[in-house]
Image (spheres, grey):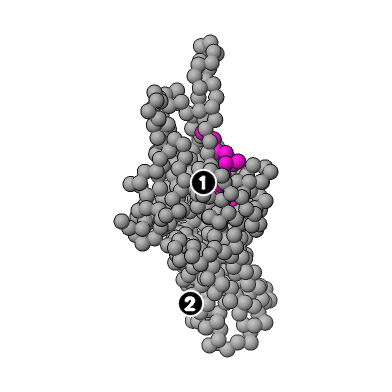
């Protein structure tokens, strides 16, 4: 049995009443890495006369890391037959509009996933400005002002890379604080259905709704950010923290927030997690990229020889861009059931795709840089920064949207 087809001891998401894990649908794209997706099908009580609710719980490693709780519903199932009314699909206009509105009205500063998305969104915006500074004068000489390419371009490159580095650190913290107990995040609320004719109570109806108070991710507790409080759940071996608002979080050793896991966890779990490996590669790449940006500060790069510039500036930019490319592809793979099957319906896949395109732009910028004495190579190098930054911005804004959509509902 390959590693991707089953959960390791102590890592299996906890079951929930009414659902059972479909062992045949635990899978991942890479055979020697941990599973990235699993399905929980509805469980029929033998005494229940109604058909089982047409709801599946979806566990995905990316969703779990981002504090999201996905379900899949049968939109053709009639509520009066199943006894359950389901929420609107997240692809509906009203749901999309509501999330977009939240993007400009809601700031969950305690949510690491939100901070990751905002870091790369702001960093991408700075790099777009950088692209204007270094490319526009080449496209239209009349627009150039004194020091635009060297000074404005150098400093915006440094600021953008610094913000990316912060995003890389936050990505690592996000990966370290992944919930391991399998948070469901939904609850059934019972109401009484009334008949249309006489308004007399007829039969109980259940409605499945998000329930933040039962969420065990650290994102649900605004007081847990950067704090290592402890709580032990009496019902099982998982550890939780519950604050006075009723929010719950968990981690394997009882901490609500952790800076770094143990070496044992690194060896037995994290090195087999494709999402963690992608985050680690991105963090290291952002660090390398940041070194190049420091070298690009005007007072530094102006006093360097061409050989040093090619190695410490263009070389680190190329290497950092290549790392971004690999990381983005791994994020795409994480959402796929097979390495060759695109996951068109998953937001995370599109985030990885746009970041992949942006990473190629950053890589080309660095790779063409040593040949900048050639006007054509210089033009394409500067232009690659410009369109690469725009692609990164698109991916980052989708990630921003994803960080606020904690309860996705998909169609079966």
Mark 1 element type: loop
Residue beneath the point at 56% across and 84% down: 309
- How packed mark 1 is, by other alpha carbons closer than 10 Å (few <14, some 14-19, many 20 or more), is few
What is the residue that sits farthest to the top in this orientation?
198
| Residue 307 seen in the figure | yes
Give x and y (percent) for residue 278: 47, 63
Which marked residue is nearer to the observer: mark 2 or mark 1? 1
Give x and y (percent) for residue 109: 66, 53
> Where 189 falls versus 331 (above or below)?
above
What residue did someone put label 1 on?
A: 236
> Where 401 falls versus 208 (above or below)?
below
Q: Is residue 230 left or right of residue 195?
A: right
Disc ID at residue 83:
none
What residue did someone put label 2 on?
A: 368
Q: Quadrant of the rendered structure where residue 272 is?
A: bottom left
What is the residue that sits farthest to the front in this orientation?
234
Q: What stretch is highlighted in magenta?
A: 208-220
Mark 2 and mark 1 lie on one chain; the one further toward the N terminus is 1
Residue beneath the point at 57% across and 61% down: 173
Instruction: Estimate the spatial distance between the alpha carbons at disc 2 and disc 1, rounded to whole Å.
Output: 57 Å
> Where 171 falls versus 383 (above or below)?
above
Residue 129 counted in the magenta span: no
Residue beneath the point at 48% across and 53% down: 62
Q: In this view, does 324 lie to the left or right of 126?
A: left
Q: Is residue 128 left or right of residue 371?
A: right
Using the image as rendered, state which of residue 210 and residue 402 is in the foreground: 210
**Circles 2 and 1: CB atoms closer than 8 Å:** no
Mark 2 element type: helix
> Where 226 falls versus 57 (above or below)?
below
What is the residue that sits farthest to the left in this orientation?
1
Q: Quadrant of the rendered structure where residue 28 is?
A: bottom left
Residue 212 counted in the magenta span: yes
């Amino acid at each position: 049995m390959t590693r991707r087809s089953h959960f390791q001891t102590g890592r299996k998401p906890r079951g929930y009443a009414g659902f059972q894990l479909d062992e045949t649908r635990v899978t991942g794209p890479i055979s020697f890495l941990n599973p990235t997706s699993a399905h929980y099908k509805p469980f029929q009580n033998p005494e229940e006369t109604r058909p089982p609710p047409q709801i599946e719980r979806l566990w995905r490693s990316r969703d779990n890391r981002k504090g999201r709780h996905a379900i899949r519903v049968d939109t053709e199932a009639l509520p009066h037959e199943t006894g359950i009314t389901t929420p609107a699909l997240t692809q509906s206009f009203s749901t999309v509009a509501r999330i977009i509105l939240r993007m400009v009205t809601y700031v969950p500063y305690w949510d690491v996933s939100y901070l990751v998305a905002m870091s790369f969104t702001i960093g991408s915006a700075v790099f777009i400005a950088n692209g204007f500074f270094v490319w526009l004068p080449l496209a239209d000489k009349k627009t150039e002002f004194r020091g635009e390419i060297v000074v404005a371009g150098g400093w915006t490159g440094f600021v953008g890379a610094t913000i990316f580095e912060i995003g890389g650190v936050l990505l690592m913290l996000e990966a370290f604080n992944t919930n391991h107990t399998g948070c469901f995040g939904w609850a059934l609320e019972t109401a009484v259905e009334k008949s249309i004719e006489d308004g007399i109570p007829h039969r109980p109806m259940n409605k499945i709704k998000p329930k933040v108070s039962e969420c065990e991710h650290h994102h649900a507790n605004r007081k847990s950010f950067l704090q290592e409080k402890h709580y032990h759940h009496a019902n099982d071996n998982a550890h939780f923290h519950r604050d006075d608002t009723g929010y719950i979080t968990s981690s394997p050793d009882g901490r609500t927030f952790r800076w770094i896991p143990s070496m044992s966890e690194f060896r037995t779990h994290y090195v087999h997690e494709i999402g963690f490996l992608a985050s680690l590669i991105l963090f290291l790449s952002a660090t390398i990229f940041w070194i190049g940006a420091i070298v690009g500060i005007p007072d530094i790069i102006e006093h360097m020889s061409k050989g040093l510039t090619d190695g410490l500036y263009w070389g680190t930019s190329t290497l950092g861009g290549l790392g971004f490319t690999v990381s983005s592809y791994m994020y795409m793979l994480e959402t796929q059931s097979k390495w060759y099957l695109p996951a068109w319906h998953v937001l995370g896949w599109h985030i990885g795709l746009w970041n992949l395109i942006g990473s190629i732009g950053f890589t080309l910028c660095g790779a063409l840089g040593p040949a900048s004495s050639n006007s054509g190579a210089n033009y394409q190098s500067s232009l690659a920064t410009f369109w690469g930054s725009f692609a990164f911005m698109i991916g980052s804004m989708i990630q921003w949207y994803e960080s606020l959509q904690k309860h996705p509902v998909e169609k079966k």
